Amino acid sequence: MTTPAPITSLQNSHVKRLVRLRTRREREQEGVILIEGARELHRAAASGVNLDTLYTCPALFSPEAQALAPELTHPHLTVLELSRAAFEKVSGRENPDGLLGLAPTPRAALPEPGPDAVTVVLHGLEKPGNVGAILRTADAAGADAVIVLGRGADPYGPNVIRASQGSVFTLPVAVMDEQAAQDWLAARAFTTVACTPDAPRTYWDAPLTGRVALLLGTEHEGLPAHWRDTDHSVSIPMNAARGADSLNVATAAALVLFECARQRRAQAQAGA
């Protein structure tokens, strides 16, 4: 570990690089991700992510950041201190806590699913907040993996990492093209469940036990036709009398994921 003098210039090469890395193209070209915040860094480290570089600003440390910083160190880690102005320049947050790390982009492999595995498949979602919230919920509900199709929101983008509260590091997340995802699900005999507003069956009436893949599309366009041709299609009933006709996709995912968890619990209790 090295600890050079604090970086104060906004024209410093490290500061300029971190600003560039806020764009997906730059991160992909370098093969790195930005992880900002004590909670997110803690979950990344606990999941085996090794930082290359840790940028700190003790003047901005929260109590959690101050306690965590020493725990993140390892023999090959470079630690660089930034001034308040420099850190605020590179931070993507209104109230940064003084910790930001660089790590190689994870290459998560999907695990071979168990008999009751739940996989979430996201088609075309572009809003980092929605993708991050779904990752956080999938983690909390006990899902086994998340598949992000094509060039939707970068699951390892700083805003997704933040919205997921670091859950992107605690469950397998794979970016796949559509055919590869369909082949992977079919080869493992997943029951596919399309979540779509026009489905006649409500989500709590569908069988969601066993090996299940939940398919979610964008709020505006939903799932394309070739992803709606599934074993089951489910909808979430709404109070149409007041004009409600859709839910935020992250909210919809939460309802269906926890219904999966409820059905599994009921099944386990019935078999006990």
Image (cartoon, rainbow, N blue to C red):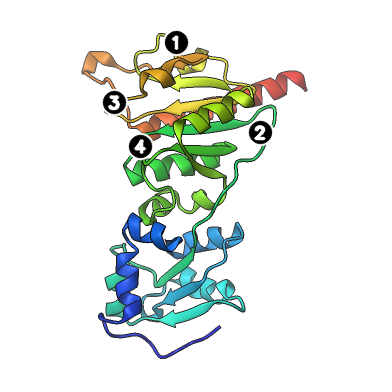
In screen coordinates, is 12 left or right of 209? left
Viewport quadrant of the N terminus? bottom right
Within 10 Å of disc 3 (Cα), the crowding (few <14, some 14-19, many 20+) is few
Indicate the position of residue 217 as horizontal and vertical percent values: 37, 29
How far apart are the two marked residues, 4 and 3, measured between alpha carbons? Answer: 10 Å
In screen coordinates, is 55 left or right of 245? right
Total marks drawn?
4
Residue designated by label 3: 221
Q: What residue type is labelled 1?
A: Arg
Q: Does the CB distance between marks 3 and 2 fall below 8 Å?
A: no
Q: Does the CB distance between marks 1 and 2 fall below 8 Å?
A: no
Q: Nearer the viewer, mark 1 or mark 3?
A: 3
Q: Quadrant of residue 237?
A: top left
Residue lying at 60% horizontally and 75% vertically, measured from the top left? 74
How far apart are the two marked residues, 1 and 2, measured between alpha carbons? Answer: 26 Å
Residue designated by label 2: 113
Vertical side of 49 occupied by 180: above or below:
above
Q: Quick one: SS at disc 2?
A: loop
Within 10 Å of disc 4 (Cα), the crowding (few <14, some 14-19, many 20+) is many
How far apart are the two marked residues, 4 and 2, measured between alpha carbons? Answer: 24 Å
Residue lying at 32% horizontally and 79% vertically, measured from the top left? 13
Q: Which amino acid does label 2 sit on?
A: Pro
Q: Which of marks 1 and 2 is in front?
A: 2
Residue designated by label 4: 125
Q: Which amino acid does label 4 sit on?
A: Leu
Q: Which amino acid does label 3 sit on?
A: Glu
Q: In front here: 153 or 137?
A: 153
Task: State which tag comes first along the sequence, 4 or 3.
Answer: 4
Q: Quadrant of residue 61?
A: bottom left
